């Protein structure tokens, strides 16, 4: 790996990869090295890239099937459009701070893993900065793998071996009741996943949490909610967090099995656009061991 340089993002996890042009990556060229770094470090940053939308899709496809939450809504002949984390409207203006579009963006300020509410959760998210603001708008990552390894045994014992239930509308309801009732947040049944996701490549475990989580096996609603909050607080201590300030051309990707993330506020009158593609996890990513078959708590 002498052809590129690695710089730690945080002592606990993550590296910046310097000297690698993502436009040159193929299944046989450089991707095996990228995938190995992904498994080892959980988060990878590539600065100053000129990554085209087509190559963005290609790169995501190397990690796994492209996640498509709007497949059921797309009309015949309509093509997949790369999702955007953005306040920019079709006419080029920005959404108001209390518009439902902006409120949905604000739900991203809650610590979460993507797609825990889907029948097949995400393996990774590849974010590409297209338009950035003069201040704010950072993306923060928290290593649930590092946190789980250092978690006090008494706290680990309260969640180990249990399942957690996830629902898309649950995270939206924390911000806006009206938002949570929209059809797009109620399309999928509740999902039941193990509290711990084991990486099959290296055997390392990570706590699998999200703002979409609403119940824990073996606890009543209040107990489960309190435990989820306590676990999230532990995993998001400063020593487990990397905060990324965006520049146009930055590409940030991370392992959804082992990292939670959140956005931070920015001046809403300023346009911001991050292109976001999630790749779905496969059985080879440890999905089989994540499944739990039991009734809701």
Image (tube, rainbow, N blue to C red):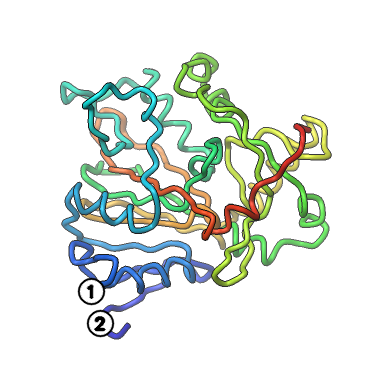
Image location (x, y in percent) of residue 213: 63, 37
For label 1, count other residues whose C-alpha is less than 10 Å away and answer few (under 14), some (14-19) or many (20+): few
Image location (x, y in percent) of residue 45: 34, 62
> Quick check: 184 above or below 222?
above
Q: Is 154 on the left or on the right of 164, as rendered?
A: right
Quadrant of the image for the N terminus? bottom left
Image location (x, y in percent) of residue 5: 30, 78
Q: Is 71 on the left or on the right of 178, as rendered?
A: left
Q: Which corner quadrant of the image does residue 202 belong to?
A: bottom right
148 and 133: which one is in front? 148
**Which residue is rendered at x = 24% and y = 71% of the image?**
20
**Which residue is rendered at x = 83% and y = 58% of the image?**
154
Q: Are marks 1 and 2 in contact (CB under 8 Å)?
A: yes
277 and 264: which one is in front? 277
Q: Is 78 on the left or on the right of 73, as rendered?
A: left
Image location (x, y in percent) of residue 83: 31, 37
282 and 250: which one is in front? 282
270 and 110: which one is in front? 110
Q: Which corner quadrant of the image does residue 79 belong to?
A: top left
> Residue 19: which disc?
1
Identify the element where label 1 is drawn.
loop
User: In the rendered image, which residue does mark 2 sit on?
Assistant: 3
- Residue positioned most to the front: 76
> Quick check: 113 above or below 175?
below
**Which residue is rendered at x = 64% and y = 51% of the image?**
290
């Amino acid at each position: 790996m002498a052809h590129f340089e690695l710089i730690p993002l945080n002592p606990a996890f993550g590296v910046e990869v310097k000297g690698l042009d993502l436009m040159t990556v193929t299944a046989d060229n450089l991707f095996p090295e990228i995938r190995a770094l992904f498994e080892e470090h959980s988060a990878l940053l590539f600065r100053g890239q000129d990554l085209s939308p087509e190559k963005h899709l290609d790169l995501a496809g190397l990690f796994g099937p492209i996640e498509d939450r709007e497949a059921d809504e797309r009309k015949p002949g309509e093509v997949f459009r790369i999702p955007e984390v953005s306040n920019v409207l079709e006419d080029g203006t920005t959404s108001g701070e209390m518009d439902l579009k902006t409120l949905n963006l604000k739900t991203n300020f809650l610590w979460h893993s993507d797609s825990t509410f889907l029948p097949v959760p995400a393996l990774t998210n590849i974010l590409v900065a297209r338009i950035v603001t003069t201040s704010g708008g950072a993306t923060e990552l928290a290593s649930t793998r590092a946190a789980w390894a250092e978690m006090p045994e008494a706290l680990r014992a309260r969640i180990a071996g249990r399942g957690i239930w996830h629902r898309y509308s649950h995270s939206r309801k924390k911000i806006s009741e009206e938002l949570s009732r929209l059809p797009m947040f109620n399309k999928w049944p509740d999902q039941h996943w193990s509290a711990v996701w084991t990486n099959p490549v290296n055997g390392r475990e990570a706590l699998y949490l999200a703002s979409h989580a609403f119940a824990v096996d073996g606890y009543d609603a209040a107990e489960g909610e309190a435990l989820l909050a306590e676990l999230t607080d532990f995993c998001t201590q400063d020593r487990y967090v990397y905060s990324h300030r965006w520049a146009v051309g930055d590409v940030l990707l991370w392992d959804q099995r082992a990292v939670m993330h959140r956005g931070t506020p920015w001046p809403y009158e300023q346009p911001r656009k991050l292109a976001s593609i999630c790749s779905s996890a496969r059985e080879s990513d440890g999905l089989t061991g994540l499944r739990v078959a039991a009734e809701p708590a």
